Structure formats: structure tokens, C-alpha cells
Image (cartoon, rainbow, N blue to C red):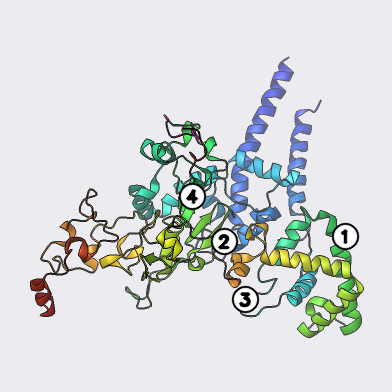
Amino acid sequence: MLNRREFMATSALAGAAVAAGCKAGSRTWYRFLSEHDVGSLTAICDQIIPADEFPSASQACVLTYIDLQLTRHYRRHQQAYLGGLEQANLLSRKEFGVELAAASPQQQFAIAQAVEKQNPRFFDLVRSHTMQGYYGSPRHGGNRDAVSWRMLGLDEPPVRGRAQYDFTAGRKP
Amino acid sequence: MRRFLFMGVIALCSLALLAVGGTYGANLYYATGHGTNCADCHEMADNVGVVHASRHRNAGCTDCHEASLATKLRHIRVHLTGSAPESIRLREADVQQMMGNCQKCHRQEYAGWHAGPHSATYSEIFANAAHNQKRRLMDDCFRCHGMYFDGAVRDVVQPQNTTGPWHLTRPKMADQATIPCQACHWIHREGSPETKPAERISVAGAAVHESVGFYDRREQMHFGAAMLTIPALYDGARVLKVSPDQRQALCYQCHAPRQPEAMSIAATNHWEPQAGSGDDRTPMGVHEGLSCLSCHNGHNESAQASCATCHPAMSHCGLQVEKMDTTFASKASQHNIHWVKCTDCHRHGVPQVKRSVMAAGQ
């Protein structure tokens, strides 16, 4: 059994350990992706849906969607993303001597095309997830402010009067 | 035995000290970081990020959010077990609790809301015999009443029929608000803190505050009033003139028209939706083109004394406008103030004598 001194010392150590654990590591507001990964993925996603009069993929929080889902339903794709992004950065360094995030939009487009040819599985995954994040429901993390729905002219939420179902229909008199 | 007792007391005291110290310590920790410390647990990072650009950027998390020991323990459990929901959102209990904190700063708005019909409680809405005898309750009711409630209508009121008598299944909900502040206010939304306007009267027209939005229960998020739809409406076969005031788009989410019955004249000719159908109150007749906010105060919904904004005290007919036979003067009137027309009283047209007086500008 612990004596009083040991009890107090253990409590203090436990508290310090919890505090240290909470602060460990660099602060990032993404759940799975590192800041470096986010920069690279932003470059690819924004080549798939670039900005025009409506926001680009990254501006519509597609990265938030992908990052969130990689910790949930798409956990199985984590390694594909890490490997694919590493490959994209390797290509960028080899071709242009810079990280993908630091490359010009034209260079990023060229890298995205190269990734599409060399690693179609990863590119299809990113393209598919970018579309989901951009056009899906905002509650899943992407499509910030339902921007794609407004782009498509959807009234969301629709103006509709209260439902007037006749619950007595089909009932025997 | 004494030794065990002594250790027990020490353990209890330590636990109590940890609880108190933990609660106040954590509050201090959260307060000093202005939210960024809350975001150390990544789940709420997005929420913290947006509030830093909101009207409430100068408020601390715990100024609005409850931060009891039980809540903190729940957050820790969720964090450690990785059971955080996909999107962090308020539960109804949080919303109800927060309203007291809203009241601390927004006293006048809260008092106005409390005095008006939008402060209707669960008891008033869901155990309303006059309503329930005419129409069965359904989950769609939650779209506008109790939008934060996590459950179905059968979880709120029983029996589910039109004969009653009805009772709330959770009596503690009886006095809870069904349209809380967060139904129409998007607290974390971008915006600038309120400042004294440079001009008392804006010539640019009514602004739509970014923080005003409709909480859509289905999507579990707010949609800003600026992006909501103002419907195109018909008055019979005629396209109705509807005010473009975007603020009233929020009203239309609940005070919405219905689609006409199939095979009706309106449906056959595509004159839909018709103004005044369902819960719609779009002004027709003499008030056509006015915004809801032209007459109704935003929080208590009162239209009292609003006539004087546009009218002289006496109408062209020589009657006091506030005492004319409309629902403004008496709810028993046959003439709804929203769509009263000249011809409701002047069935054969405006009298000649009045017309000549009007033409003379007298």
C-alpha cells in the first residue's frame, strides 16, 4: 500500500504526465494529416477543382473533409494517402526542385497529371474524395457554407410548408 | 483501522481537491488560451478557429459554454476513446443551458424574445389540445419547433393520436424553449464585433447580419440568411410582389407556403405556391411588397406601433388605421392584416367622393 508521501508524489507525477501528454507534439488543427501533407494535398485538390467565381476545393474545406474521414470511414486509405503524397512530392522535387506545395500552379498541374498516370489508384481516390467533399453535405466537413449547392442553384434548405400527411387515409371507418 | 480511516480521508480529500482544482484549473487554462487551448484536443479545432473570426471573438469559450467537471470528464472520455462525432455540435441540453449565458449580455433581446411567441415551450407546442385534435404531431414539427431535440416526436409526447389527452414524456422539458436563440443565431459565424454605427440611419438598406441563420435540423448546421431562398409566390393567377429584404428569408423557412392540392386550379396552371397558404404570411393587398421586418420586431415579433412608420394616423377613408376592422385591431376580425385589400370593404370600388378627395391630395 502507498504511504501518504508516495500517494502525493504519484498524484503529482500522474498530473504532470497527463499535462505533458496533452501538449506533446506540434499543434495542428488537422486530425490525421500533417501540415506538410495538407500543403501537398491542397495542391492536388485545387488542380481538380480550381477557383473561379466559386471557391476552389481547398477553399471549400475539402481538406477538412478528407482529413476527418481518414480518421473515420476512410481509415483504410491512410497509407495510400501518405504514400501517394510522398510520391507526388518526390516527383515535384525531381522535376522542379521544389516541394509540391511551393510549386507554381502550372507545375502543380503537371505533377497532378504525372501522379494520375503513375499512381492512378491514389489519384482516383483523391479525385473521388475531392468530389465528395465539395459536393456532399457540409456536415461531413467539406462544402463549406454549402457553396457547391449554391453554385448548382439548389435551394437548401428548401422553402416548404409543414407536411400535411393525411394519417387517416386507408383507415377503416 | 485508524490507519485505513486516515488513508481514506486523505484519498477523499485529494479527490475533492483534484476535482475543484481540475475544474477551476481547466477553466483558467481554457480562458488564458482564448480557445486555442480547447483546440488542443483536435476535435473542436474547427469550432475554435471560426469563433476567432466571429462577432463573439472577444468572448471566452466558458463565457457561453458550460464547463462543469462532468462536462470535462465527458470531453476527456470522448477524446480518449476516439468517439467524437463527425461534426462537433451542441446537444439540446447545451443549447438550453447556453441561453442563460446569452441573456447575460443580450438582456433586451432576450426579454423581447421571452415576451413574444417564439419563446413557446414544449408544453405549449406539443401538448396543445387545440392543435393536436386537428392534426397529428409528426417529426416534421421539429423542423421549426425543437430543432435541437435528438429524437422523434413520439419521444416527446404521447399518445400519438388526435384524441388525447396528451402529455410530455419528459416532464422536465415542459418549460424548455422550442425556438432557442441558436435556432436563428449562428454564434460561431464570421462577423465583426458590434460597434456603434457611424450613421444612425443607413442609406444602404437593411444589412443581413452574417450571424443570422437558420438551423437546419436535417443537416445539423446553420444556413446563413443571406443564402436562404425567398420564394416566388402567386396571388391567384398573379405573380405577387415580394420584398427582396433578405432578412425575411429566415422567416420563410418556417412561415412557408404549401404546394397546392393536386388537380387544383393553382396546381393545374402552375400558379404555385400561393401566398397565404400553409403558414405563409406574405403581405398581399394594401401591404404587398412589404418585408416581415417592416412591421415585426425581430425578437418579440410585435408589430405594435409599426403602422405609424408608414401611415398617417388617419386613412384615406378617414378612419384610424390602427382601429380599422383588421386582425391588427382585433384577432376576431375577418380581415387578416397581412392580406387585407381595399376591396374587402369597398366591394364596389373606391367611392367617388373619396376618389375625388384623394385626387385633390387632401
Residue pointed to by mark 1:
A79
Residue A158 as seen in the image, left or right of residue B1: left
Compare marks 1 and 4 and give the one earlier in the sequence. 1
Please state which of the two labelled residues, at mark 1 or mark 4, is closer to the viewer: 4
Residue B155 visible in this rendered orientation of the protein: yes
Residue pointed to by mark 2:
B51
**Mark 4: secondary structure:** loop
Residue A4 as seen in the image, left or right of residue A120: left
**Mark 2: secondary structure:** helix
Mark 1 belongs to chain? A
Compare marks 4 and 3 and give the one earlier in the sequence. 3
Residue B349 in the image: state x and y as whole percent.
17, 69
Marks 1 and 4, how far apart in space? 47 Å
Labels 4 and 3 share a subunit: yes
Q: Amino acid at mark 3?
A: Phe
Tell me which residue sits at (37%, 61%) in the image. B275
Instruction: State which quadrant residue B164 falls in.
Output: top left
State the mark number for residue A54.
Answer: 3
Magenta region: B157-164
Residue B351 as seen in the image, left or right of residue A22: left
